[in-house]
Amino acid sequence: MSDLAIVLVSGGMDSLAVASIAAKKHSKLAFVHLNYGQKTSHKERECFDKICEHYNVDNNHQKIINMNFLSQIGGSSLTDGRIEVSKFEGDTDVIPSSYVPFRNTHIIALAVSWAEVIGASKIYIGANYEDSPGYPDCRPEYYKAYNELIKQGTKEGTIEVLTPVIMMKKSEIVKLAKDNNAPLELTWSCYARADKACGVCDSCALRLRGFKEANEVDPIVYL
């Protein structure tokens, strides 16, 4: 069986931490990045390129897929310029405006398709349960169901989606990345801006809280 593993690399902190885990477990990595029309897509692509370079992922094992159809569907402040990115209002069960409807289902499906082509049996994703009150596709139950779907819907039925940080707090993810010498300075989490992180959107707030609780300094620039 191939030791090749696919990692979904958004350019954010969680996916970097997951990449650092995969790099320790597998001799060969393939990275996937998705452009779904998000407002910070150019910055995230820049981070992806630098993370690929850090982990020595060759060009044949880098896949950038255009999912701009999600911006055509709309319904999210990340993809629709008419919807303002909301500020973090504390831990809540309310789904925020940044939720992209059913996004991870599309993303994982594309990764599974590529896994069948290149012979990878593992797909790593930085889904995190701390996000789950707002993002239903970041919950453990979702990935359990998805893996069952993959078994039924692929040729060999052996591909598996792994979520190694799903039950970790953001502070634990920060510590994990630091312990694995992952380049956190190359990541970007802000939903609203690509020059300096806004510091107040859901993603920025959770990231900043994680660094604070880990007693670490976030290396990116904020307003």
Image (cartoon, rainbow, N blue to C red):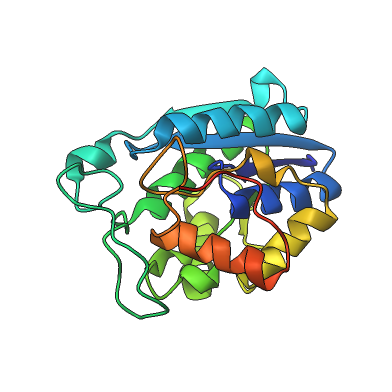
In which quadrant of the rendered view does residue 93 lie?
bottom left
Q: Is residue 61 left or right of residue 203?
A: right
In which quadrant of the rendered view does residue 135 lie?
bottom left
Q: x, y percentage for residue 138?
A: 47, 66
Which residue does the image show at 56% across and 36% down from the upper left? 32
Residue 122 visible in the current orientation: no
In which quadrant of the rendered view does residue 41 lie?
top left
Q: Is residue 67 left or right of residue 186?
A: left
Residue 162 visible in the current orientation: yes
Q: Nearer the viewer, residue 64 or 212?
A: 212
From this view, report whether residue 84 is shown above or below residue 46.
Answer: below
Q: x, y percentage for residue 12?
A: 56, 47
Q: x, y percentage for residue 90?
A: 40, 77
From this view, report whether residue 194 is shown above or below residue 74.
Answer: above
Which residue does the image show at 50% across and 38% down from the upper left? 113
- Give the residue furthest to the top: 59
Which residue does the image show at 32% across and 36% down from the upper left? 37
